[in-house]
Image (tube, rainbow, N blue to C red):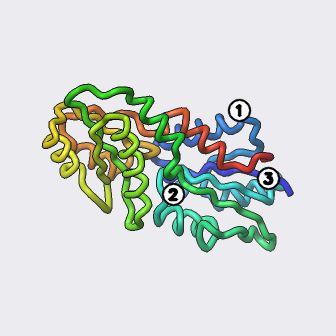
Amino acid sequence: MKTGIIVLGMHSDIPSEVVVAERCVSFLVSKGRKNVRVAFHRGSPSSADVIERMFTEEGVDTFCILPLTVAEGNQTVWNMPKRMGLPDNAGSWMMVGDHDVATRFSTALGRDPRMAKAIVEHLGKPSQGDGILLLAYGSELSMSAKTAEYYAEALRDGGWIAECAFARFGRTVTEAMESLRERGCGRIKVLPLSITADGKYTKNALASAGPAEVLCPVSGLPAFLEILDSKVPEDW
């Protein structure tokens, strides 16, 4: 068995997402991980192409796939695995030519106490009139809303007035901003619960936010990299 790691981004045509993916690869290599490569669900290099090349050229036959996503949804459960030849994210093998290749499709960031602590520490203590809007992409499945609410609750425990909104499939930014203002928030910070804030739907959602300070996405926090590394088997 020869193991490899795929850092799987969504779109190679979004430069900031490529930067995040490459930063993740560099971090994993710095931690001693071997045979780490970037692939993309949409764009180039594709996940299927990277797996085939690593198998045929390097003899890697067992893969850990790390999707660069914050919450589970149709993309992680069905679409990303299907693009690389897996039935879903529980699939444990795929075919490369006539050969079986073992796969381990990891989970999204999800509801992680390490990230909750990092977010609260990053934002610090609120002042009177401060509010936080957590902006997630959204999903037709329930996990995106549950993940966003988990981090919102952590911020509330830290003294913040916090609301959730979604770029798709859920409560809009306009609705969440109105709620924050009704609760006396004159200064609002928007924290993207995403890998990048440069996707089409997220940019459109941010444009509707009005006067607000847009923070860097959670992928920019050091905890994101540490959590990603923790999803790789220890001896890889």
**Residue 28 position (above or below residue 166):** above
Q: CA distance from mark 3 to mark 2?
A: 24 Å
Amino acid under label 2? Arg
At x 50%, y 40%, the residue is 115
Q: CA distance from mark 2 to mark 1?
A: 27 Å
Amino acid under label 1? Ser
Which numbered mark, 2 or 1, is in the foreground of this view?
1
Is 210 left, or right, of 22 in this rendering? left
Q: Determine which residue is flagged by label 2.
A: 42
The quarter of the picture where residue 82 lies is bottom right
Mark 1, secondary structure of its residue: helix
Q: Nearer the viewer, residue 218 or 49?
A: 218
Mark 3, secondary structure of its residue: strand
Task: State yes or no: discs 2 and 1 in contact (Cβ < 8 Å).
Answer: no
Q: Determine which residue is flagged by label 1.
A: 30
Disc 3: CA contacts within 10 A as few (<14), some (14-19) or many (>=20): many
**Residue 157 position (above or below residue 140):** above
Mark 2, secondary structure of its residue: strand
Image quadrant holding the N terminus, namely bottom right
Task: State yes or no: discs 1 and 3 in contact (Cβ < 8 Å).
Answer: no
Amino acid under label 3? Thr
Residue 80 in the image, given as x and y percentages of width and height: 55, 63
Say which label, 3 or 2, has the lower sequence index.
3
At x 44%, y 36%, the residue is 119
At x 77%, y 71%, the residue is 97
On residue 3, the disc is 3
Is 176 left, or right, of 151 in this rendering? left
At x 76%, y 46%, the residue is 234
Say which label, 2 or 1, has the lower sequence index.
1
The quarter of the picture where residue 169 lies is bottom left
Q: Is residue 69 visible?
A: no
